Amino acid sequence: MEMGGAERMAVNIANALSEDGLASFLVVSRKEGPLAKFLLPQVGFFCLGKRKSLDFAAFKKLIKLVKDIEPDVLHAHSTSIYWAVAVRLFFPKLKLVWHDHLGVNEEVIKENPRNELKILSKFFHGIITVNSEIRDWWIKTIDFSPKKIRYIKNFPFLNIEGEKVSNRIPIILHVANFRKEKGHLNLLKAVEILISQQFDFRLKLIGQIMDEELYQEIKKLIDSNGWAEKISILGPVEDIGKVLQSGDIGLVCSDREGLPVALLEYGLAGLKVISTDVGICAEVLGHGKFGSVVPANSPDQLALAIQHVSQEINSSEKKAMDFQYHVKEVYGSKQFLTAYFEFFREAGLGLEN
């Protein structure tokens, strides 16, 4: 369970269900990971120790867990759906809901048409998506009742203590695992523009190394350009709330997204936010009301937005405060659970609270 958005949402949902009085259990396939420590004590937690795709020993553990716990619903995130479908073959009465976190665009579908999921969907009882675009794509793509495909907004769960730090030089945070679609190289092009214009800043790159080749390319660019004083790579961070409180600006630089949890976490932490126009990020930011929205793969626009947000202090801080309130009111755990239980009720899945 690495420090990714889908993994954070799995923890957030398990905690929210538990706080709402339901027996909640979280099962991870490979490693316990740093996020496990953020689970509430009452949440049951199990690690299967999976070592390869077809690890029969790990699968046997999962079957025993399901038999012992006797859950009403199996909520599978992202690629865990494959094992979840296999589990249903042993427990046909078990309700299976898939949570699809992957953003959808032409490139994604071309590289991964997801044809096997169209076949496996006959074992699903419902699909939850992280934005309306993914929901609409599934409705058009598979023979599945539209009322059983629901977009439910992600929600953040942060441990924030004390006052936010005020910095003389703007500290910019980019919370995203090192993957090509997360826009690190676009961000470094914007960095080059900022440095050429003598704009002073500090940038922290926070996230798990998922693409080693990309990570090495980023390190090489930083070292060869002499940017080490301005850019630091923190890697995965356990207490993300503490790091966010130390920053001024939060960035989403992705080429594609659903709804990144980091965007909502920036809001909770009171950061000034800049995001590329991907997924529903612009919608979340009120199309500029709560933060700046720039085109994807446009380093000049990104650099300009960073300068503007840093220099127009009063208006930027007002947007940050408004966004913080907006996230709490619209994207909190209560809103998620209301939509979650409504989805189960309307889809006839039998889970109500």
Image (cartoon, rainbow, N blue to C red):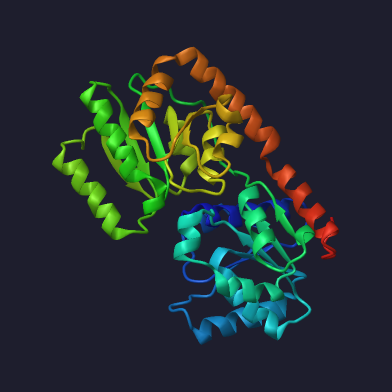
Using the rendered image of the protein, determine whether residue 228 is visible from the camera's viewpoint.
Answer: yes
Taking the image as shown, residue 228 lies to the left or right of residue 257, namely: left
Asked whether 260 or 73 is in front, the reply is: 260
Quarter of the figure that contains the C terminus = bottom right
Q: Position of residue 71 (x, y in %)?
A: 74, 71
Name the spot of residue 50 as percent of width and height, x first: 48, 76
x, y percent for residue 322? 61, 23
Q: Is residue 102 above or below residue 306?
A: below
Residue 296, by quadrant, is: top left
Figure disc tally: 0
Quadrant assignment, res 93:
bottom right
Residue 86 falls left or right of residue 32: right
User: Image point 44% across, 14% down: which residue?
Assistant: 312
Q: Residue at x 85, y 58 (%)?
A: 345
| Above or below: residue 279 compared with residue 72 | above
Q: Residue at x 20, y 35 (%)?
A: 227
Question: Is residue 42 in view?
Answer: no
Q: Residue at x 34, y 34 (%)?
A: 299
Estimate the x, y position of residue 58 in percent, counting from the top left.
Answer: 53, 81
Residue 22, compared with residue 86, is above or below; it is above
